[in-house]
Image: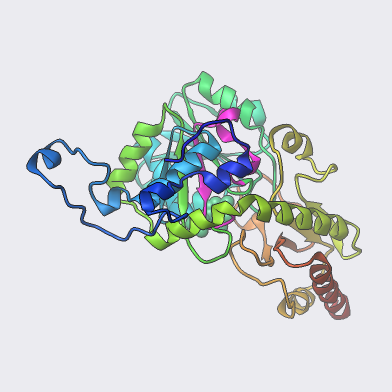
């Protein structure tokens, strides 16, 4: 689509990938194509399927624009879009796992990923073994002749364990097993999955790519060995995202690096400030030097997003409610990656099975938005004062 003449820096790719103004009367952005029916001019054309677009579900110029930008950014072979991050995950799992197969899934994955394995895949005769996300090369011991796929997510949802993706990929590939990664946290900018041995990369574009909490979208990017299989399942499942949502993701992409730099900066500054706060027991943020995942983050990642967690010192539910209910800037909600700051209580003990969570106090996941850090600190400080007053 866009003319690639010289090698480009990533920021330039974000501004130019997936655009072709000459094709759209000079307009800078690829328009929103809404449509189901695509007309063929002749019998020969329909018999030979000789045009770029055939039917709305199978792609539009808007979809193609986002796909080509993401292929370029992640360095994959092909990109497919789905209506949500979770449907990207379920599509990939269904593409590789059949009745009688076995899959390995990190204990720290996004909880609905786990529910899909425990319910849908189980019903279809696929067995799942959860593994400690910090297992590294030890994953080899869990691979059986029936294992088809290793699912990774780094850092892990809510608790931010870093995974040794290259070590896991080496062990998996030695047994012909496909490695899939939910790369949502790092975005296509801060971790390059295909350069680290991943075969299929997934993003909930709902988060940072869209970036404004106003659309749902999933992205699957494949390497050459996995494209055909994933594309077939994607086609058979009949998945296609809404045109406006695709457009919003394209628009979000243009400013992704600028937003992420600020999310990263504010997130790290907040994490440092929280680590020194008397009400905070511990901070879970892999880009902080004293985090157990720091060495892996530093080796493999080129940046951090604005999502991390803290564990508070033990306190009562009423005190926690006093803190959270009256926050002015931090909203309580289940997403992240938008411009706004968020805070969410969580308890991994409720669903994890092979790792232990020994925190004594409540855990909170924070998303550092694009507000001024001083205002965010003041909001949290006032919350801590209410917490202390109600303890
Ligand atoms: C790590 C991760 N993966 C996938 C998803 C699912 O994305 P969606 O909500 O678009 O289905 C989420 C959503 O919170 C997530 O946090």
Q: Is residue 191 magenta?
A: yes
Residue at x 67%, y 60% (from the top left corner): 347
Residue 273 horizontal/vertical position (percent): 87, 59
- Say left or right for 86 vs 48: right
Does residue 191 appear in the picture of this structure?
yes
For the C terminus, give its image quadrant: bottom right
Near-viewer residue (367 or 258): 258
In the foreground, 317 or 271: 271
- Residue 135: x and y in percent read 66, 33
- Residue 49 percent across, percent down from the top left: 18, 39
Q: Is residue 373 placed above or below 122 in the rendered structure?
A: below
Q: Which residues are magenta?
A: 187-209
Whether residue 69 sits left or right of residue 367 in the image: it is: left
In this rendering, position of residue 165 left or right of residue 20: right
Answer whether residue 183 is visible to the viewer in this image: no
Q: Residue furthest top?
A: 174
């Amino acid at each position: 689509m866009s003319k690639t003449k010289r090698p480009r820096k990533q920021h330039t790719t974000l501004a130019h990938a997936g655009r072709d103004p000459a094709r759209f009367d000079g307009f800078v952005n690829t328009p929103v194509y809404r449509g189901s029916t695509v007309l063929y001019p002749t019998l020969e054309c329909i018999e030979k399927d000789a045009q770029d677009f055939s039917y709305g579900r199978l792609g539009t110029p808007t979809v193609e624009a986002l796909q080509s930008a993401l292929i370029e950014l992640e360095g994959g072979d092909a990109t497919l879009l789905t209506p949500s991050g979770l449907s990207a995950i379920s599509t990939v799992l269904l593409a590789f796992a059949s009745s009688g197969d076995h899959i390995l899934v990190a204990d720290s994955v996004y909880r609905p990923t786990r529910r899909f394995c425990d319910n849908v895949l189980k019903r279809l005769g696929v067995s799942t073994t959860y593994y400690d996300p910090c297992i590294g090369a030890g994953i080899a011991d869990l691979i059986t002749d029936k294992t088809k796929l290793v699912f990774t997510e780094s850092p892990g949802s809510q608790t931010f364990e870093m995974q040794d993706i290259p070590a896991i990929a080496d062990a998996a590939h030695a047994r012909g097993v496909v490695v899939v990664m939910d790369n949502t946290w790092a975005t296509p900018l801060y971790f390059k999955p295909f350069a680290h041995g991943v075969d299929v990369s997934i993003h909930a574009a709902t988060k940072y790519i869209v970036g404004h909490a106003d659309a749902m979208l999933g992205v699957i990017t494949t390497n050459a060995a996995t494209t055909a299989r994933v594309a077939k399942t994607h086609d058979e499942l009949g998945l296609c995202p809404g045109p406006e949502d695709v457009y919003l993701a394209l628009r979000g992409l243009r400013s992704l690096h600028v937003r992420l730099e600020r999310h990263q900066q504010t997130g790290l500054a907040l994490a440092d400030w929280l680590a020194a706060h008397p009400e905070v027991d511990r901070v879970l943020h892999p880009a902080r030097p004293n985090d157990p995942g720091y060495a892996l983050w530093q080796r493999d990642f080129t940046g951090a997003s604005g999502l991390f967690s803290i564990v508070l010192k033990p306190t009562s539910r009423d005190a926690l409610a006093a803190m959270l209910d009256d926050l002015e800037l931090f909203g309580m909600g289940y997403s992240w990656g938008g411009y706004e700051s968020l805070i969410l209580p969580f308890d991994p003990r409720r669903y994890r099975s092979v790792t232990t969570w020994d925190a004594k106090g409540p855990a909170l996941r924070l998303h550092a938005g694009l507000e001024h850090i001083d205002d965010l600190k003041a909001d949290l400080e006032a919350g801590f004062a209410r917490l202390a007053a109600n303890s």
